[in-house]
Image (cartoon, rainbow, N blue to C red):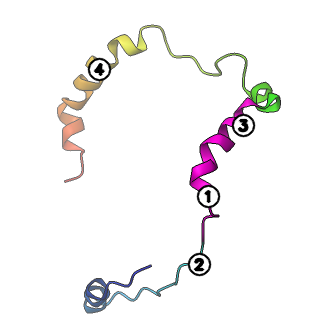
Amino acid sequence: MKNNNSIQQELNDLGINIHQRSMPNMQVPEGYFETLSDSLLNQIKQEEFLDSLPKEMPYQTPVGFFKDFASTLNSTIHQQDFLENLPK
């Protein structure tokens, strides 16, 4: 984590004292990103992964939900009480 002295000074000027912690030294294994996609695809192709997926969709949406979604959302946003309750 890079220490930005101007931010730290501004916090000090405001009387805010935040204890600084150093970030742990972490490294990604060599070649990790080059082999990640192949590794994921191999895991997905395993039978136990495929068997763990639900056979039917676990959730349902009401009939016509997406047909009217945009207009319902727009009308909700344009209601006066909604607009008045937005953070300033």
The answer to whether residue 61 is left or right of residue 7 is: right
User: For the residues marked 2 and 4, what is the alpha-carbon distance in whole angstroms?
Assistant: 47 Å
Q: Are marks 2 and 1 in contact (CB under 8 Å)?
A: no
Q: State the extent of the magenta-drawn residues as a range.
A: 27-45
In the rendered image, which quarter is residue 75 located in? top left
Under mark 4, the amino acid is Ala
> Which one is closest to the eye, mark 1 or mark 4?
1
Work out whether 7 lies above or below 76. below
Residue lying at 60% horizontally and 73% vertically, measured from the top left: 26
Residue lying at 47% horizontally and 87% vertically, measured from the top left: 19
Of residues 52 and 29, the one drawn nearer to the viewer in this rendering? 29
Between disc 1 and disc 3, whose residue precedes? 1
> Which one is closest to the eye, mark 1 or mark 3?
1
Q: Is residue 43 magenta?
A: yes
Under mark 3, the amino acid is Asn
Q: Which residue is mark 3?
A: 42
> Which one is closest to the eye, mark 2 or mark 1?
1
Between disc 2 and disc 1, whose residue precedes? 2
Q: Which mark is residue 71?
A: none
Q: Are marks 1 and 3 in contact (CB under 8 Å)?
A: no
Between disc 1 and disc 4, whose residue precedes? 1
Q: Are marks 2 and 4 in contact (CB under 8 Å)?
A: no
Q: Give x and y (percent) for residue 42.
A: 72, 37
